[in-house]
Image (tube, coloured by chain):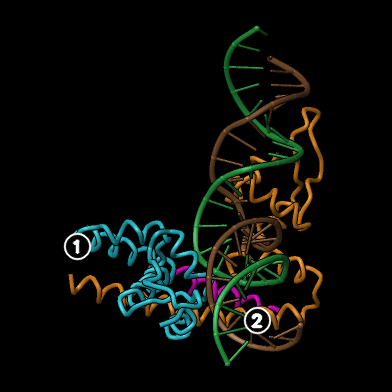
Chain colours: A cyan, B orange, C brown, D green
Amino acid sequence: MTLREVCDAVGVSRRAVQGYEKAGLVRATGKTSRGYLLYDEGAQQQIKKIKLFQELGFTLKEIGALSRATDEELKAALERQVEKLKQESGRVGEMIRVAQEMIERL
Amino acid sequence: MTLREVCDAVGVSRRAVQGYEKAGLVRATGKTSRGYLLYDEGAQQQIKKIKLFQELGFTLKEIGALSRATDEELKAALERQVEKLKQESGRVGEMIRVAQEMIERL
DNA sequence: TTGCTCCTCACGTCACGTGAGGTGGC
DNA sequence: TTGCTCCTCACGTCACGTGAGGTGGC
């Protein structure tokens, strides 16, 4: 698949993928005769995975480390992340209440 | 109050306040003979307010615009923000579920 | 030659973090 | 003079956004 096709399929920008490559998280698996970047199924899955981990709140650096981690380490990292996400969830809920209170007073 | 005192009281960094000043959102209200920056009660409240609006998800630029907005405009902006925060809340909840599923499978 | 699509830099953005170098008074 | 605290730059960081300039084939 070309870069554009992968981007459309996964829902990331070309520039984001470029960022992933710079961080050493993926690589194009080939190029067409015209120089277009190509990605195979594995690379596309990898890009999808990077995006998911980003949404879980990991930085690109952390994602790189996790790809080299054991299952135990990955599990521990996910558990820490769940705690962070729960805190974030509480914070967001609180902000919704605060904003609604402000609206009431206007 | 000195900058340090304000930072300690409000819970922001000196560098953050410097960023607020650069964005035109606050100004030191004076300086001591030693050149230390001073902030009065009003300035401190302003810094607190900036921090709150940031936590509601507004950028510094938006916060500047809101300070010059009418109550109607502010209300509308807050309502839009509540919608965004609700979406964010849903997203975070989903991410918690995804992470927990990943943990189960390890 | 023109138009189209894609490529590879590389500076810009946002909200600070993190020193660097300098100052004033005990 | 040394130590301490604070000041004002100014480059660095993170994850891209946004052009700029160039290429290949219809």
Question: Is B56 above or below relative to D10?
Answer: below
Decide which of B81, A6 is in the foreground and name it: A6
Say which chain tag 1 marks: A
Evaluate whether residue B38 shows in this view.
Answer: yes
Residue shown at 49%/72% (left/top)? A92
Q: Main secondary structure of the magenta part?
A: helix
The percent coordinates of residue A82 (x first, y second) are: 33, 67
The chain containing the residue under callout 2 comes to A
Q: Which of B80 and A13 is in front in this view?
A: A13
Give coordinates of residue B43: x percent, y percent.
75, 52
For the residues carrying marks 2 and 1, which lies nearer the camera in this image? Answer: 1
* Residue identifier under label 1: A71
User: Is residue B90 among what the camera can see?
Assistant: no
From the viewer's perspective, tell me whether residue B33 is left or right of residue B54.
right
Q: Quadrant of the C terminus of chain B?
A: bottom left
Relative height, residue A76 to residue A85 (above, below): above
Report the residue marked by disc 2: A104
The magenta region covers: A90-106
